[in-house]
Image (cartoon, helix red, strand yellow):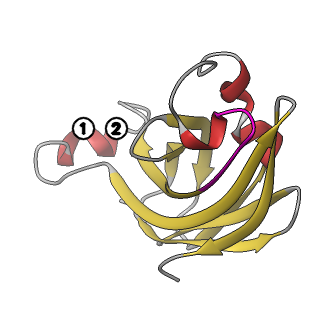
Amino acid sequence: MHHIDRIKIDKFNQSGFSFSVHISDGMEGSYQLKSSIYNRQALLGEETEEISLDNSKTRKTRTISYDQLFHKCFEEFRGSNIYACIEDTGAKSFFTLESQLIPLKDKEQRITKIRDEIELTSAEKTEFSMDTFTNNREVEVNSFQPVDQ
């Protein structure tokens, strides 16, 4: 089975960041790649896509804009005590980026044989911090720092 070797934050700037999910070689097939960004207070974003993998190593890269990351601040989290979402407030917050690789159930006959033998879901995490200031329904990111790379 394929598994996630690591997650690496590649680039970051004033508008967003990109990260790569490095995937080992493994069994050819269809998988679900799920990425989540959260802190101790809330799940800020989650994205899932179906990917097809051959038997070689691969890398999947995603880009997240800060507007996309913080869009819940002004709808779902409005009036909450989530530091990065409070109007006229600056905050330094730590976030976790987690990716999971899940083989799609019974897409491949071979998965059925090993389903009970091993854990099929692979997951890895990395962390980053951001200094933000929120004003006029916009979160401005003043600094971005990977924590454990």
Name the residue type under label 1.
Thr
Residue under the image location 64 percent in, 19 percent down: 78
- Nearer-the-camera pick, 120 or 65: 65
Label placed on residue 112: 1
Q: Disc 2 on helix, strand or loop? A: helix
Q: Quadrant of residue 4?
A: bottom left
Residue at mark 2 to residue at mark 1: CA–CA distance: 6 Å
Farthest-out residue, bottom: 149
Side of 53 relative to 41 (left or right): right
In the rendered image, the quadrant that contains the N terminus is bottom left
Residue under the image location 37 percent in, 56 percent down: 123
Percent x, y for residue 147? 51, 76
Do the numbered discs 2 and 1 sit on residues whose CB atoms are within 8 Å? yes
- The answer to whether residue 2 is seen in the rendering is no
Q: Answer above or below: position of 5 versus 18.
A: below
Side of 105 relative to 128 (left or right): left
Q: Quadrant of residue 3?
A: bottom left
Percent x, y for residue 97? 52, 56
Q: Disc 1 on helix, strand or loop? A: helix
Residue under the image location 74 percent in, 69 percent down: 143
Percent x, y for residue 77? 59, 22
- Nearer-the-camera pick, 75 or 83: 83
Name the residue type under label 2.
Gln
Span colored in magenta: 86-91
Is residue 89 rendered magenta in the image?
yes
For disc 2, the marked residue is 109
